[in-house]
Image: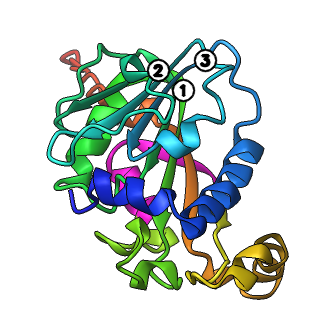
Amino acid sequence: MATDAHAASDFYGTARGAVAARLLRARLGAIWPDMHGQAVLGIGYAAPYLRLWREQAARCVALTPAQVGVARWPTGRANLSCTAEEDCLPFPDLCFDRILLVHGLEAADNARRLLREVWRVLKDDGKLLVVAPNRRGWWAHVEATPFGHGQPYSAGQIGRILSASLFRVERRDTALYLPPTRLRIVLRSAPVLERAGRALVPHLAGVLMTEAVKDVYAAVPLLAAKRRLVLAEAA
């Protein structure tokens, strides 16, 4: 994967990173407001966002792909973080209610193999939320942020790769209309700029947010129709 855990950690430790995380958490919280009793998995670099549900969820795990290095909770709760190969997740089948994929899809060595593993560990009634950089947005073109690494996507591209991996898109959203600047005066105006961008230039969102569910019926092969042999009686 192209995203480095240490670089991502450094980014979220800056004022610009903190504001970006706050804007994204606001949208994530609107999509998944109540996670009480849920088993939640974050893949990629998800620790800044999983804190939304850490106190609610029955289990909340941050997984960082092995080639990136382990990303630990800011509080040092290392038992809630782990590292593994992206195409071989160390969990049994059907064990998570919600999976957040952030700084993951765009940086995966093989996105479809990653999504097939996500499909395996997600419960049949579970939900996947993919957060990926928008190829038309400003953030995808600034390499000093984690959103500027890897392969950015359009909404259509995300929909197609999810469909090919046996997921069905149920909801789309956008976030991060704030320009990727370090200027304090702009960062202080982030909420206003976010609302204005959503209303005026929706195609320039920094990230695309796509919620999907398992397309269970697409994974079940159709049974071949039985052939009937009709015997005609001799006249």
Q: Which residue is mark 2?
A: 96
The N terminus is located in which quarter?
A: bottom left
Q: Residue at x 85, y 76 (%)?
A: 192
Position of residue 213 measured from the top left corner of the image (x, y, whole percent): 53, 37
Q: Does residue 156 appear in this view?
A: yes
Q: Amino acid at mark 2?
A: Phe
Which image quarter holds the C terminus? top left
Q: Which residues are magenta?
A: 158-172
| Residue 82 numbered mark, or none | none
Residue receiving disc 1:
126
Q: Nearer the viewer, residue 152 or 26?
A: 26
Q: Is residue 212 above or below residue 192?
A: above
> Which mark identifies residue 38?
3
Can residue 172 be seen by looking at this rendering? no
Q: Residue at x 22, y 15 (%)?
A: 233
Q: Earlier in the sequence, mark 2 or mark 3?
A: 3
> Coloured how?
rainbow
Above or below — where is 66 with respect to 126? Answer: below
* Element under disc 3: loop
Where is residue 27? Give x, y as percent: 71, 53
What kind of residue is marked 3? Gln
Marks 1 and 2, the one that precedes in the sequence? 2
Q: Are marks 1 and 2 in contact (CB under 8 Å)?
A: yes
Q: Residue at image x 46%, y 43%?
A: 46
How crowded pointer 3 is (Cα within 10 Å; few <14, some 14-19, many 20+) is rated as: some
Residue 193 image offset from top left, x and y in percent? 78, 80
Badge 2 density bin: few <14, some 14–19, many ≥20, Cα 10 Å: many
Q: Nearer the viewer, residue 123 or 15?
A: 15
> Was residue 159 drawn as part of the magenta stretch in this picture?
yes
What amino acid type is highlighted by mark number 1?
Gly
How far apart are labels 2 and 3 at the CA level? 8 Å
Measuring 24% from the left and 28% from the top, which residue is drawn there? 89
